[in-house]
Image (cartoon, rainbow, N blue to C red):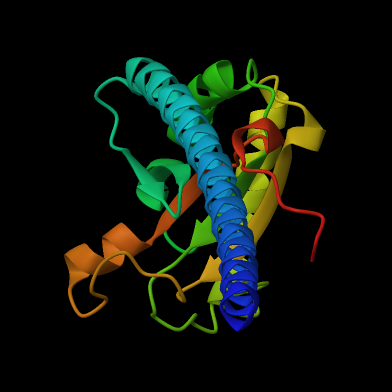
Amino acid sequence: MLTRIAGVVLISAMFVSGCAHSKKLQTDLDSCHAEITKLHKQGNALSDLASLANARANAYKDLARLLRDALGDMEFEIAIVDGRLVLRLPTAILFESGKAMIKPSGDDALKKVAGVLKTRDRLFIIAGHTDNVALRATDAGYESNRHLGWKRADNARKILVKHGMAEKQLVSSGFGEFFPVADNKTDAGKAENRRIEIIVLPKVSELPTISSDI
């Protein structure tokens, strides 16, 4: 009788143990499935990001090619800065030294730029940069290099509008000497820092979406 009872107890213990093991196995399987689903979603998100980046790169390449064709052998530079396409025009092409009014060669250059950009459904920042030489007393009307940079940028903006670009596409800003691209210790570096930049802003459709959980 005792032997039979012991057998029943042993079988019951094995059954309970088996059930516990089965539950753990199911939990582990559920965890693995959840992790696979998460990795799958991350893979899709990375694929979407790659597609967006590729589309933006192709759009920038096309725009850069059109600008190079339009400007020809004129002095300019096209660069990618912080993920944005930037066209740099030396102020020597656009302005007289210490002045903010666009000269004829500058009007011609900006007319060519407008011919390319006005067909694009984008926003653009026109940024005015200077070297680090302080303004002289004879530079009447400008409070600082930043002010001079902004005035030059705004006059460039007006010329672009004159040649067909929409007002709503453009905003002007002055950065003065604060974002040099070369060493201000040399004349060549200073000349390089005196520039107007036309910054191409990405479209919303070219940017990754942001989760609403913020």
Residue 91, how many percent across, how many down?
Answer: 41, 51
Residue 104 can be seen in this image: no
Which residue is nearer to you in this view: 152 or 79?
79
Residue extending furthest toward the front: 1
Residue 212, how many percent across, how many down?
Answer: 82, 55
Residue 82, how many percent across, how many down?
Answer: 45, 55
Q: Is 10 displayed left or right of 191 in the figure?
A: right
Q: In which quarter of the image is the C terminus?
A: bottom right
Residue 47, how many percent across, how many down?
Answer: 48, 34
Which residue is nearer to you in this view: 174 or 96?
174
Q: Is 7 displayed left or right of 64 in the figure?
A: right
Residue plotted at (57% across, 72% down): 7
User: Which image quadrant for residue 50?
Assistant: top left
Q: How many marks?
A: 0
Residue 90's place in the image compared with 133, above or below, is: above
Which residue is nearer to you in this view: 129 or 139?
129
Residue 122 can be seen in this image: yes
Q: Is 152 displayed left or right of 104 in the figure?
A: right
Residue plotted at (49% across, 30% down): 56
Residue plotted at (45% across, 74% down): 177
User: Which image quadrant for residue 128?
Assistant: bottom right
Residue plotted at (65% across, 59% down): 173
Q: Quadrant of the N terminus?
A: bottom right
Which residue is nearer to you in this view: 148 or 178?
178
